[in-house]
Image: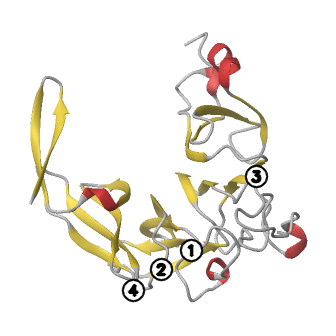
Amino acid sequence: MIIYSIKKKNYYTELKINLDLKNILDTVIIDDKIYVSHYVDTENCTFLEIYYAKISEDLNFKIFKKFDECGKLGAGSGRMQKYVFNEKEGILLSTASLQQDAADNTAQDDNSIYGKILFIELESGNYKIFSKGHRNISGLFVRDDLILATEHGPRGGDEINIIEYGSNYGWPKASYGEGYFKKIDYAKSHIDDGFVEPLYAFVPSIGISELIITPENFDNKWKNTAVVTSLNGRSIYVLKFQSEKLNKIIYFITGKNCRYWCFKKI
């Protein structure tokens, strides 16, 4: 049993947790339960799992979904969001491709869970491939039927994608980035090879991370705006969309310009 402390105002409440937190990838709260994407390392494989617990001071996690496919180079991504698909409540779960460059084809293989976004039904635990051709999704946002994802490219070529069911986003065949360890001629036009073009590609990459959409009642200036964090640049990017459909980015700002433009009226 591991005991952690969470500060509440001027006092602490001890939470009893029966799960090793060091291997957690993401969390999502649905009703009165918290779901945790988690991985387990064995001698030769990494296995992806989802646990759940009823929210209380005693978080007794139980297994919700365990995948038996061996990830030989570890697990990444693991982003989760609540989603309703075909009138069934469930979780969208992103999984990373197993290679940095184009050494394997798991992201295109329908028999593999890796390099995908999966939809997992809450009631049954059954899952299906929602989209494929992903390298490493680091941010996932859902609002009604709109799904946005931020994705690490190889050297250069980070992406923001609009995710739609049944779509293929091209990895490892297409990317606006380049190989890390060797020269790889990725297709630059996704659409020419039947893949979905990114909504926006950062070339060079910014080390893209989480993405949120500012609430409509936050401030008029921030309407139809996304906030994106950057690992490599250690910056916050503010992206302005054309409309509430969030399907076209007009411009983005960061750095000292953002400090002036973004916050002077707030």
Which dot, 3 or 1, sits closer to the camera? 1
Please tell me whether mark 3 sits on a helix, a strand or a loop: loop
Sequence-wise, which precedes: disc 4 or disc 1? 4
Residue mark closest to the camera, 4 vs 2: 2
At label 2, which amino acid type do we have? Lys
Mark 1 touches mark 2? (CB < 8 Å)? yes
- Is residue 48 rendered to the left or right of residue 99? left
Tell me the crowding category of disc 1: few under 14, some 14 to 19, or many 20 or more residues within 10 angstroms, Cα based. Answer: many
Label 4 sits on residue: 68
Label 4 with label 1: CB-CB less than 8 Å: no
Residue shown at 18% from the left, 25% from the top: 9
Query: Which residue is drawn at the image coordinates 73% and 38% (left, top)?
Result: 243
Residue picked out by circle 2: 72
Q: Nearer the viewer, residue 101 or 187?
A: 101
Q: Which is nearer the eye, 35 or 98?
A: 98
Residue at image coords 62%, 46%: 208
Q: Which mark is residue 199?
A: 3
Of marks 3 and 4, the one in the foreground = 4
**Label 4 vs label 1: CA separation?**
15 Å
Dot 1 or dot 2: first in sequence order is 2
